[in-house]
Image (spheres, rainbow, N blue to C red):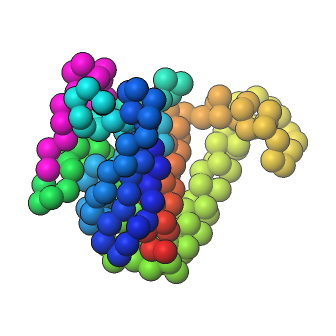
Amino acid sequence: MKLINISEKEILLELKTTDKKLEEICLPKDNIHFWYPFNINFYYKHSSAKGYMYLVQDKHYEGTNHYDTTILKRTKKLMKHEGVPLNLPVYERNTYIMSKAFELGIPTIAQSYTSESVQHGFDTLAAIIDDLKSQIEEGYVKTVGETSIPTNTEKWDRNVYKYATEEELAELQEYGEMYTMLSIMRKLAQ
């Protein structure tokens, strides 16, 4: 799934089809949060037989399926709300993520924003993630007794995150979705 900014009011969505081709769909920029998942482990494909796009979960994703995705046989065509596709579970999760972002001082895709405010959102989010990572590392050090904290090693990160609480992991997931939202905003602001 690829999102391309084509004009002030429209985007082009490139989707892989069930018969391994590409389908291009032109959609309005407004209210993209009604249907576009902020979780990168979910994406749309286009059913060649049914003639519409449907949401799928990456086969390697083991986290929570907040979007209620299911197999193609059980999918339905997306509803439309004022000319915009509407995937209700996606919209509800995105609304939740946007309200959390707003509370943290991060601009949201449903507000007016500029390239500068989006960059400020990235900076704010990076500081918040660093704080959470430090908290998780402290918990790991207390639990395991590890005294030296190496900088930026993959093995260290894997070990540390094994000791993160469910709440901390859920928070990280939410921050990842905020990051995706900001990335979309940066693309749309160009």
Expressed as whole percent of the image width and height from the top left, the position of residue 42 reads: 42, 37
175 or 139: nearer the viewer: 175
Could you say which quadrant of the image residue 30 lies in? bottom left
Identify the main secondary structure in magenta.
loop
Quadrant of the image for the N terminus? top left
Span of residues in magenta: 62-80
Name above or below for residue 31 compared with residue 172.
Answer: below
Query: Eyeballing the image, is 100 above or below 135?
Result: below
Q: Left or right: 27 with respect to 146?
A: left
Count of number-bearing discs:
0
Asked whether 77 falls inside the magenta stretch, the response is: yes
Return the x and y of residue 8 as percentages of the image width and height. 35, 75
Q: Is residue 145 visible?
A: yes
Q: Is residue 189 left or right of residue 34?
A: right
Q: In front here: 63 or 58?
A: 58
Say whether residue 171 is visible.
Answer: no
